[in-house]
Amino acid sequence: MSRPFPQIVSALGDRRCLVLTGAGVSTDSGIPDYRGPGSIARTPMTYQEFVAAPEARQTYWARAHVGWSRMSGAEPNRTHVALVELQGAGRLGGLITQNVDGLHERAGHLDTIDLHGRLDRVVCLDCGQRTPRSSLHERLVRLNPGYADRDGPTRPDGDVLLATTDDFVVADCLRCAGRGDVGRLKPDVVFFGESVAKPLVQRCFDLVERAEALLVLGSSLQVMSGLRFVRAAAKREIPVVIVNRGPTRGDDLATVRINAGCAETLAQLS
């Protein structure tokens, strides 16, 4: 039986490729994407909004608390597993993900670069301490009994759209509370209006410089955060393969462009 996407095999060959993944990789795990077919329109809270007012943080954490009850139950899918297998076979030169769900690591992938951070960690904006999201979730459950059972559409950022949030009780940093400080907690992810840390960006560019090919999976590349690595790979004139349902901002830079799902396309490399 012929393979439906032979061009990915011819483009990558036996090259060790750097992989860049986006939200389309996690849709088979039940996590909605940002811009794919049928995606829910969203207006994400910016970092500036989050830090400006307690009411904004109350709205965010209420929605995120309900969403975490669903997001934390997501399991890796065939794409995550296939990438682990390719890594084990020595065929990958690194993996950069724009996703914040931690599913690559849960699938067993080693040395994943979480470009935009992780939802399963929380950082205090006042003292800098990082703590597990699970610990905060337990505190929020005690402060807001039954709140996590509220209904609403799940959004790609791991939150749930709720009609009202003014009855939600926010938890602050325990270390800061002991010092008499405010202790504003934030998920350890990059909000709109924030920038990825420069050392992490440089680490990604270093991987691009060493890569023999770049494979983009499930990303529309609408934000420069990921597109810059595609541009860098194209400038080096190494093969750039983009697999995504729908158009991307990097299509004109691609050596091969496949409009299909990630899992069935990766099957060609096994």
Image (spheres, rainbow, N blue to C red):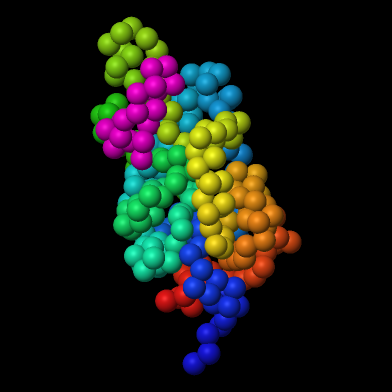
- The quadrant in which residue 175 appears is top left
Q: What stretch is highlighted in magenta?
A: 120-137
* Residue drawn where x is 55% and y is 62% of the image: 212
The residue shown at (67%, 52%) is 231
Q: Quadrant of the C terminus?
A: bottom left
Q: Which residue lies furthest to the top in this view?
A: 180
Residue 72's x, y, as percent? 34, 47
Magenta region includes residue 132: yes
Q: Position of residue 37 (x, y in %)?
A: 61, 61
- Is any atom of residue 53 visible in this view? yes
233 displayed left or right of 63: right
Per the image, is 187 magenta? Answer: no
Question: Along the horizontal axis of the image, is 242 left or right of 138?
Answer: right
Instruction: Please state which of residues 14 and 38 is positioned toward the viewer in this rendering.
Output: 14
At 31% from the left and 13% from the top, the residue drawn is 177
Q: Toward the viewer: 235 or 44? A: 235
Percent x, y of residue 84: 37, 63
Whether residue 62 is visible, yes or no, is: no
Vertical relation: 60 (above or below) 255? above
Q: Against 153, is 122 above or below? A: above
Q: Position of residue 170 (x, y in %)?
A: 38, 24
> With 35 as the anchor, is 210 left or right in this view?
left
